[in-house]
Amino acid sequence: MRRIAIPERANWRERAEEAGFAFHTIDGEPYWDESAYYAFTLREIEDDIEAPTEELHGMALDMLDDIVGNEERLRQLDVPEPFWDLIARSWRERQPHLYGRMDFAYDGTGPAKLYELNYDTPTSLYEAAFFQWQWLDDQQRAGRLPLAADQYNSIYESLVEAFGTIAQRLPRPFYLSAVRESVEDQGTIEYLRECAVQAGIDCGLLAIEDIGVSEDGRYTDLKDTVIGTLFKLYPLEDLFREEFGRYLPNAGVMLIEPPWKAVLSNKGILPMLWQKHEGHPNLLPAWFDDGRSPLPAGWVRKPLYSREGANIDLHLPDGTSQRSDGPYNGPCIRQAYHPLADFDGRSVLVGSWVVGDRACGIGIREDRSLITRDTARFLPHAIVAEQTSVLIA
Amino acid sequence: MKRSRTAALLLMSAAPLMLTACGSDDATSEGLYTSVDACVEQTNDRYTCQEAFAQATAKAETESPRYESREDCIAAHGEGQCEQRKTSTGHSYFMPMMTGFLLGQMLRGGQSAGFAGNPAYRDRAGNWQRPAPGAAGGVYRAGSAGAAMAPINAQPNKAPTVSRGGFGSSSSSRSSSGG
């Protein structure tokens, strides 16, 4: 795994515009960055990322039977009691799920270490599935990357296939929903609709703020039609807590991601995984944490419900500490500190995608700080043969 | 190869589209109702509902799937859903009962510009379906019935909304709800 500088495509901004990539630059700061790419060998991808992703995904699903019916576990995970039955039922019925992303610390040597599971509302999907694919295609056509170069990225094909597989189980109408004002979230659900439509599923977009409730407690669209299936790019724990959440158990709506994902997207799954598979090479030691007692050097504290690197408390082995702001509080976990890969002073996080139950691609995020925030840049990657990559470098 | 063979965009691409979402000025809206009363409750338009029901009933006589045997009809539509009919020449056949009707409204600039009523049926599993375009008439044999019917995506589930905006309040504290 190496970071290799490469000329940008002269027209990449036009390419982005014509492909509906509206958030390549966020608040004036670059988000998409193709001034370099990460080169992997096929062995690194298959042995160090793809295989562990599939294994960890299976291990995570295996935890569910023990958790969904277990009051003590659900309390540890801070899941509100009115939704326990909903979660258990959704798992019993194996309600369909679509996708998730595992975040790994990986630098090309040693096992990738799992930072967390983004199993409810993962983003950076479009740029991983489509725009980095197009980048490779363009760079090959321009002769800057060999035709033999490849990419670990069958995310698009996997999404279309996954939608096709679950189509029969989705009551209609089917809506994809996200916060109206979030350009990034709207871009993500537009891409998911794209994949659903290509799988032959008729579906629409609806702002999460526009969802209505009928007198008998069912969710409605803007034409008062009862929503059959709702893909929500919005945290389950927020839906649970907000005003309309109390209708969820009886609204008859199919949610994607399904309620059982509330257990896996919760950082409390990390200590539970560690407890069951202590010493697994891809897991970091993790424990539940009261959020108050002093954090020893070499440990990281994360709220159970935190996204995009918010409210992370990092105590480095050398005794210094770093902390990120954010809106989250409540119960926490602590996880053994394991540094992100460092390439030229940049901290690199590998996001490994699972669509349906298949590990199918990665996206790379780069941040100047040790904590990867929502401002971290997205860089493309390629799989190149060892020999060839030396020549290019 | 570890990557997708293609990565086509149909909807998001600014290039000429092979497929359009719903961008034209003319649109149709279609409601599925199980009775004239249910239709009136939704639309407040008794005349249109009655006319659409009458149209649907008339079309059902010619467009309903026809089965040679009761068994074939029951296999496709379920017990208690089939009735016997005779052609003018005395030939007997079976057809499913119309269990709902579709009120399709052509909208132009948001105004209704005509309507049509069509019959709706349920298959054995309870899913709504309608005769597929061009499939009217003729006698279906076992096994072919499915192909002659098309699923109805509209749901007989309209419910007046009493409140909106009960989701989304947590989003003000962050730029994205993703991770």
Image (cartoon, coloured by chain):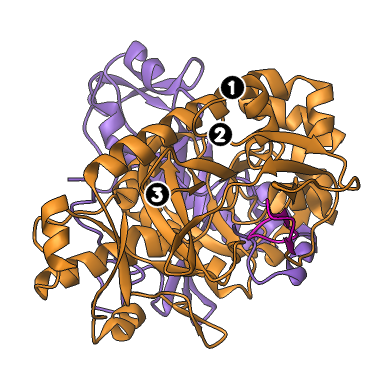
Chain colours: A orange, B purple
- Given the image, on which type of amino acid does mark 2 rest? Leu
* Residue B52 position in % (x across, y down): 51, 55
Amino acid type for the residue under numbered disc 3: Ile
Percent coordinates x, y for residue A60 in the rendering = 56, 29
Chain containing mark 1 = A
Q: Quadrant of the C terminus of chain A?
A: bottom left
Residue type pointed to by label 1: His
Mark 2 vs mark 3, foreground winner is: 2
Dots 1, 2 in contact, CB < 8 A = yes
Q: Which residue is mark 1?
A: A277
- In the rendered image, which residue does mark 3 sit on? A201
Mark 3 and mark 1 on one chain: yes
Element under disc 3: loop
- Residue at left offset 44%, top offset 28%: A55
- Magenta highlight range: A307-322
Q: Is residue A296 left or right of residue A340?
A: right
Label 2: state its secondary structure. loop
Cα–Cα span, label 1 and label 2: 8 Å
Q: Chain of mark 2?
A: A
- Disc 1 and disc 2 on one polypeptide chain: yes
Q: Characterize the magenta stretch by its predominant secondary structure.
A: loop
